[in-house]
């Protein structure tokens, strides 16, 4: 029996889809059976990032409305047999999916796959509720920006009301030179505000964008730093204790000093 | 009624007049005598405003009666009402005091979009994140970082304070007063406490130790005993 993990953020465009695609790919690289579900009805793009757009025949709404069996709607990955995608519908309305239907579909997929990764749409409305419904665990993605951290905090508050394990955090698009110059929130600061466990840190990396555009998740590249970060995250999901890469946590000396002297006005 | 027995004795002090009211006679008699006493103008020698404190002893008065007594005092020139003190309160009022005197402990991170509202004092063990809000009718103590909004003295208690292990709030509110964080990125401060200075409606922040000195009656039960 597998486990279902929802990837969510509150704020849009912080990298949920990219994270889902890469963790899924990295888990598949490690030999796990993985199913990705895109719940962003009407704005699907997990299929594009995975390079599977042209193979879609049926979608999530077809499954919800029981026009086809769940199996029939799954799109196998080009590279791994153990990786499959249940795409979102592009033309339907998100009200056609319900939390109950999601629970049923996820429960069914858990029989067959080790991991079900659910890509959540932005926001905290219907789409979010659908995405979270079937999940056992949650990953919250944030960027090192105040507004993004604020929304992550909101989502964590909502997730705490659900019947799932405490969520884990991924900080995406860190730029080390900006952290060092004190112009970007550092990972410690974010973790201390959100007070949840850190699952990983992914640098802001042009390779991610290039890879997305070519429909080949960056996790497939052997040695770019973001690829390594995603593969480490996958290993941590499997329960290995993989230390943070040095560049993942480096913190500016100046910020430390500033904090120390800045204690009193 | 025994005509020449004094039901109300008047005592002058530096802070005004104290009217000691007999607590055995009927309320109506008190009211009559009060009206009579205050209509005698020899109480007042000049135009200064004089504060009048009514001490009712072991007499129970309803809220309406209390207001009535105050009204009588107010009607005569130069007099302002200070405290109307009685040694007795109803069970209901006592229960209300108790409810407001309780410290409610809570272990939680109050996250963006979440609101906590308690009666009495709030002891939060955890943080208040930006976008989160905590409210209490009494004091607020945060054992953690206060980065959101805190509102102490929700029902108008301007004596209430807000203390935090780490203070970096977006807003502090005490009673009706509001203060907000400066627009530039302000570094937070450790172990500080916000309070309202007497007679001003500006919230000040000082070291916890200093504020404690100004609020020896920090427990809201004691505060009620002395301030009603
Ligand atoms: N680590 C990274 N480095 C560089 N670019 C990134 C990184 N992560 C994501 N991006 C880029 O950011 C953009 C948004 O990413 P993505 O579509 O994954 O976000 P999302 O959270 O799924 O958005 P939405 O809320 O619209 O679903 C994409 O162009 C993606 O390539
Ligand atoms: Mg997306």
Image (cartoon, rainbow, N blue to C red):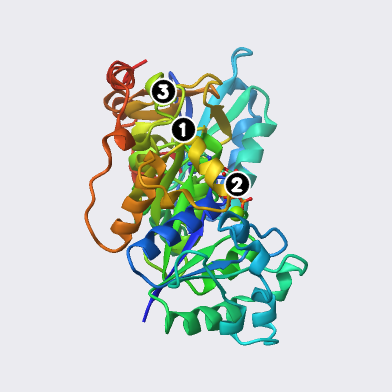
Ligand 2 found in image quarter: bottom right
Q: Where is residue A260 in the image (x, y as percent from the top left)?
A: 27, 20
Question: In this picture, is B153 found above or below A69?
Answer: above
Residue B174 seen anywhere in this rendered image of the structure: no
Q: Residues within 10 Å of mark 2 (few under 14, many from 20)?
A: some
- Report the residue at 69% width, 80% height from top: A62
Q: Where is residue A200 in the image (x, y as percent from the top left)?
A: 35, 47
Q: Is residue B9 left or right of residue A71?
A: left
- Report the residue at 59% width, 76% height from top: A99
Question: In this picture, is B117 found above or below A207?
Answer: below
Name the mark on residue B169. 1
Total number of numbered discs in the rendering: 3
- Marks 1, 3: nearer the viewer: 3
Mark 3: is the Cβ under 8 angstroms from ligand 1?
Answer: no
Q: Mark 3 points at which residue?
A: A177
Q: In this view, does B132 lie to the left or right of B80?
A: left
Quarter where residue A49 is shown: bottom right
- Marks 3, 2: nearer the viewer: 2
Quarter where residue A201 is shown: top left
Quarter where residue A250 is shown: top left
Q: How crowded is mark 3: few (under 14 residues within 10 Å), some or many (20 or more)?
A: few
Chain letter for the residue marked with disc 3 in the picture: A
Question: In this picture, is A190 found above or below B201?
Answer: below
Mark 1–mark 3 CB contact (< 8 Å): no
- Report the residue at 59% width, 42% height from top: B33
Mark 2–mark 1 CB contact (< 8 Å): no
Q: Name the residue under label 2.
A: A213
């Amino acid at each position: 029996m597998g486990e279902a993990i929802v990837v969510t953020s509150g704020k849009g465009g912080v990298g949920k889809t990219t994270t889902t695609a890469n963790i899924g790919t990295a888990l598949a690289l490690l030999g796990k059976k993985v199913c990705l579900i895109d719940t962003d009805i009407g704005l699907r793009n997990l299929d594009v990032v995975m390079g599977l757009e042209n193979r879609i025949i049926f979608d999530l709404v077809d499954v919800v409305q029981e026009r086809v069996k769940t199996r029939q709607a799954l799109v196998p990955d080009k590279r791994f047999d153990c990786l499959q995608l249940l795409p979102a519908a592009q033309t339907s309305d998100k009200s056609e999916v319900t939390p109950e239907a999601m629970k049923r579909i996820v429960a069914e997929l858990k029989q067959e796959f080790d991991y079900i990764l659910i890509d959540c749409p932005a926001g905290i409305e219907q789409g979010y509720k659908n995405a979270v419904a079937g999940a056992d665990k949650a990953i919250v993605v944030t960027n090192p920006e105040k507004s993004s951290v604020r929304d992550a905090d909101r989502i964590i508050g909502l997730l705490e009301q659900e019947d799932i394990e405490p969520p884990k955090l991924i900080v995406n698009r860190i730029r080390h030179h900006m952290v060092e110059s004190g112009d970007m929130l550092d990972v410690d600061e974010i973790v201390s505000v959100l007070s949840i466990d850190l699952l990983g840190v992914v640098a802001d990396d042009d390779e991610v964008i290039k890879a997305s555009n070519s429909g080949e998740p960056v996790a497939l590249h052997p040695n770019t730093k973001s690829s390594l970060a995603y593969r480490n995250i996958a290993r941590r999901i499997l329960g290995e204790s993989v230390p943070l890469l040095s560049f993942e946590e480096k913190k500016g000396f100046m910020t430390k000093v500033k904090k120390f002297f800045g204690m009193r006005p | 009624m025994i005509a020449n027995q004094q039901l109300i004795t008047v005592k002058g002090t530096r802070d005004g007049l104290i009217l000691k009211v007999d607590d055995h006679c009927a309320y109506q008699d008190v009211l009559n005598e009060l009206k009579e006493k205050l209509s005698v103008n020899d109480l007042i020698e000049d135009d200064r405003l004089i504060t009048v404190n009514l001490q009712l002893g072991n007499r129970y008065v309803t809220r309406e009666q209390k207001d009535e007594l105050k009204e009588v005092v107010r009607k005569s020139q130069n007099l302002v009402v200070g405290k109307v003190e009685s040694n007795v309160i109803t069970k209901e009022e006592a229960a209300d005091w108790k409810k407001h005197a309780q410290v409610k402990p809570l272990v939680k991170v109050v996250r963006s979009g979440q609101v906590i509202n308690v009666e009495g004092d709030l002891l939060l063990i955890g943080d208040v994140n930006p976008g989160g809000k905590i409210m209490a009718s009494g004091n607020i103590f945060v054992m953690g970082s206060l980065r959101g909004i805190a509102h102490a003295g929700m029902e108008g208690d301007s004596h209430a304070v807000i203390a935090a292990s780490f203070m970096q709030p977006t807003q502090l509110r005490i009673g009706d007063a509001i203060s907000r964080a400066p627009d530039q990125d302000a570094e937070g401060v450790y172990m500080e406490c916000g309070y309202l200075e007497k007679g001003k409606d500006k919230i000040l922040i000082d070291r916890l130790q200093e504020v404690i000195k100004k609020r020896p009656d920090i427990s809201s039960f004691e505060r009620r005993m002395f301030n009603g």
